[in-house]
Image (spheres, rainbow, N blue to C red):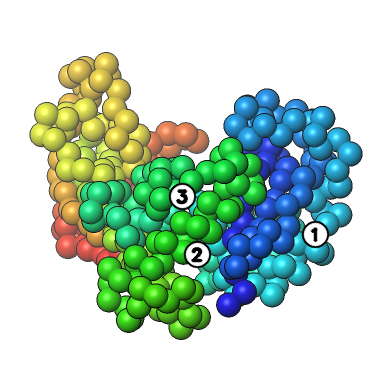
């Protein structure tokens, strides 16, 4: 299998982030690309320079990345798998720089592979996997070059991949893996790759489901009925402050809530699978009940008992 294990170093300047270095190893550990590039827009990058050590002086005579794009693109075009650690960051800047075809189906993040192997054992949150240096320690890697150069990090990433993929295959009993087998076959790699993609997709879906859950409330206020979205159930002691909150948020003006004329009560509350979607759909249903108001003012409604009953009967599903 043609594998490109990469790492980038960049100026790290937000939307104007530019590649300073790109290193790519083959599956057999051959360094097939290791180049420095001069950015077109950035002249200084003091914060990231402290991490990777690439100074403006080091790249002043180097080509721009876009001038070498065809050569880089050919490497990725013939690669069946693209590896990296926290790969999303590398893919983002490569795509921003003109590289195409680095679709999720082609990519394997060694950071996610580490989570797949040790997530349960270390009670590790999916979004809090240790750094490459820590992961390399778990895999028994000995650094011969300083970390944070693209070539050194790509080499360590490839080593971790080879160790972790074997442990992953064994952990989930995906295939027979004799100890004397030196290299994984394409079939074995695809088995592990497919299983990891399934695990990550399930984890991300479950997290999205949890994030979508929440509550909608109708609050009777002096100005009218206010619809409020909450991630968590509204505490009874906060009911009188609801009118001071923003539409669809938890913001509350405590000073205003203490005034007698702001006292309010909860008319109805519903728990939803997707509370943001529910807010939008109920807004559309009640839009013709809106009380006229100026720009930037809260949406108050004039609702009947039938409207409130309709609100209470509403439910939805998460479709993310």
Find residue 78 and report its image quarter.
bottom right
Of residues 232 and 237, the one drawn nearer to the viewer in this rendering: 232
Q: Earlier in the sequence, mark 3 or mark 2?
A: 2
The answer for how far apart the CA atoms under marks 3 and 2 are is 20 Å
Q: Which residue is mark 3?
A: 141
Q: Which mark is residue 69?
A: 1
Q: Which quadrant holds the N terminus?
A: bottom right
Marks 1 and 2 in Cβ contact (< 8 Å): no
Of marks 3 and 2, the one in the foreground: 3
Q: Secondary structure at mark 1?
A: helix
Q: Secondary structure at mark 3?
A: loop
Residue 315 position, x and y percent, is 22, 63
x 61%, y 62%: residue: 29
Q: Residue furthest left?
A: 236
Find residue 103 and report its image quarter.
bottom right
x 42%, y 61%: residue: 163
Residue 176 position, x and y percent, is 32, 81
Q: Which quadrant holds the C terminus?
A: bottom left
x 67%, y 32%: residue: 53
x 32%, y 30%: residue: 251
Q: Earlier in the sequence, mark 1 or mark 3?
A: 1
Residue 297 seen in render = yes
Q: Which residue is mark 2?
A: 108
Q: Which mark is residue 256?
A: none
Residue 275 position, x and y percent, is 29, 53
Q: Earlier in the sequence, mark 1 or mark 2?
A: 1
The answer for how far apart the CA atoms under marks 1 and 3 are is 32 Å
Of marks 1 and 3, the one in the foreground: 3
Residue 304 seen in render = no
Find residue 272 and report its image quarter.
bottom left
Q: Residue furthest front?
A: 180
Q: Residues within 10 Å of mark 3 (few under 14, many from 20)?
A: some
């Amino acid at each position: 299998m043609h594998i490109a294990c990469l790492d980038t170093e960049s100026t790290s300047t937000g939307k104007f982030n530019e590649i300073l270095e790109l290193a790519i190893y083959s599956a057999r550990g051959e360094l097939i690309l290791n180049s420095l590039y001069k950015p077109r827009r950035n002249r200084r990058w003091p914060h990231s320079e402290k991490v990777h050590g690439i100074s403006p002086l080091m790249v002043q005579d180097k080509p721009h990345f876009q001038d070498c794009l065809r050569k880089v693109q050919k490497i990725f075009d013939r690669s069946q798998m693209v590896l990296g650690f926290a790969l999303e960051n590398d893919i983002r800047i490569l795509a921003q720089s003109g590289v195409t075809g680095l679709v999720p189906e082609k990519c394997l993040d060694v950071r996610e592979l580490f989570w797949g192997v040790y997530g349960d054992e270390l009670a590790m949150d999916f979004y809090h996997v240790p750094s490459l240096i820590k992961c390399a320690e778990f895999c028994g890697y000995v650094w011969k070059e300083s970390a944070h150069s693209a070539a050194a990090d790509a080499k360590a990433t490839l080593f971790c991949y080879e160790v972790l993929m074997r442990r992953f295959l064994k952990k989930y009993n995906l295939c027979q893996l004799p100890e004397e087998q030196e290299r994984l076959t394409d079939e074995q790699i695809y088995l592990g790759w497919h299983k990891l993609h399934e695990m990550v997709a399930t984890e991300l879906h479950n997290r999205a489901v949890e994030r979508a859950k929440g509550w909608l409330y109708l609050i009777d206020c002096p100005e009218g009925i206010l619809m409020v979205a909450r991630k968590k159930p509204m505490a009874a002691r906060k009911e009188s402050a609801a009118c001071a909150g923003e539409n669809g948020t938890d913001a509350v003006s405590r000073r205003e809530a203490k005034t007698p004329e702001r006292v309010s009560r909860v008319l109805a509350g519903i728990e939803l699978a997707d509370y943001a979607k529910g807010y939008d759909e109920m807004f559309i249903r009640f839009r013709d009940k809106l009380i006229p108001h100026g720009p930037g003012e809260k949406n108050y409604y004039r609702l009947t008992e039938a409207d409130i009953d309709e609100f209470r009967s509403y439910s939805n599903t998460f479709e993310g």
